[in-house]
Image: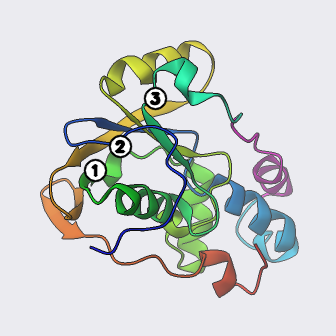
Amino acid sequence: MRRIERVCKGSLRPGQDLVAAGYAGLAGTRRIAAERAEELKQWFSPAYIEELRKAPAANVLDWTVWGAAEWEEAGEGGIYTALWTLSGAYGVGFTVDLRKIPVKQGTIEICERYGLNPYRLWSEGCTVLAADNGGRLAERLAAEGVDAAVIGCVREGIVREVTYGDVRGFMERPREDELCRLGIAV
């Protein structure tokens, strides 16, 4: 594995939990709802489109105060790029369960309409955190109004495994953000 050049803010090591704070693809959903509002009226009510456009972004916090050992803000390329960058900077692997990554229903619906991957969609406001006790970190964040969930764990080696129930696969290298497929600038 070629190390990814990145300023490391803390530490990442095998055995730590991975936590997602905020929602994968939500920023991209807001952008699509704004740019394609007229087109989306074929499938969704104007009120629903407006709700998608105004979905609140998660606050960026000082994650060390909450017990995070390391973190990577998701943005362009979605939560997949954040996971890839974080693990690549430390030369470690991970296992992540897609069913545990927080995604809003509106994001799923928009992605289904356009054939997009919500995990590769612009995710500003979503952060991947590493912690020795991810469950405790997620609980503390939830108590402060930040939606968070344990989504996997850091592993020895370089394998970046993605699961969905009994189905197991390996993460591909990051590629351009899904917004680009729609001709929308990030």
* Looking at the image, residue 142 lies above or below residue 98: above
Q: Which residues are magenta?
A: 45-58
How many C-alpha atoms fall within 10 Å of the one at disc 2: few (<14), some, or many (≥20)?
A: some
Residue 97 disc label: 1
Please tell me in which quadrant of the rendered image residue 93 appears.
bottom left
Residue 68 disc label: 3
Please tell me in which quadrant of the rendered image residue 158 appears.
bottom left
Mark 3: amino acid: Ala
Residue 44: x and y in percent read: 73, 62
Q: Tell which of 88 and 183 is nearer to you.
A: 88
Which element is circle 2 on? helix
Contact flag, marks 1 and 3 (Cβ < 8 Å): no
Residue 182: x and y in percent read: 70, 84
Which quarter of the rendered picture does the C terminus lie within?
bottom right
Quick check: is 79 in the magenta stretch? no
Residue that mark 2 sits on:
100
Q: CA distance from mark 3 to mark 2?
A: 18 Å
Q: Residue at x 29, y 60 (%)?
A: 91
Which element is circle 1 on? strand
N-terminal of the two: label 1 or label 3?
A: 3
Q: Is 152 placed left or right of 180 in the picture?
A: left
* Looking at the image, residue 27 lies above or below residue 32: above
- The mark closer to the camera, 3 or 2, is 3
- The mark closer to the camera, 1 or 3, is 3
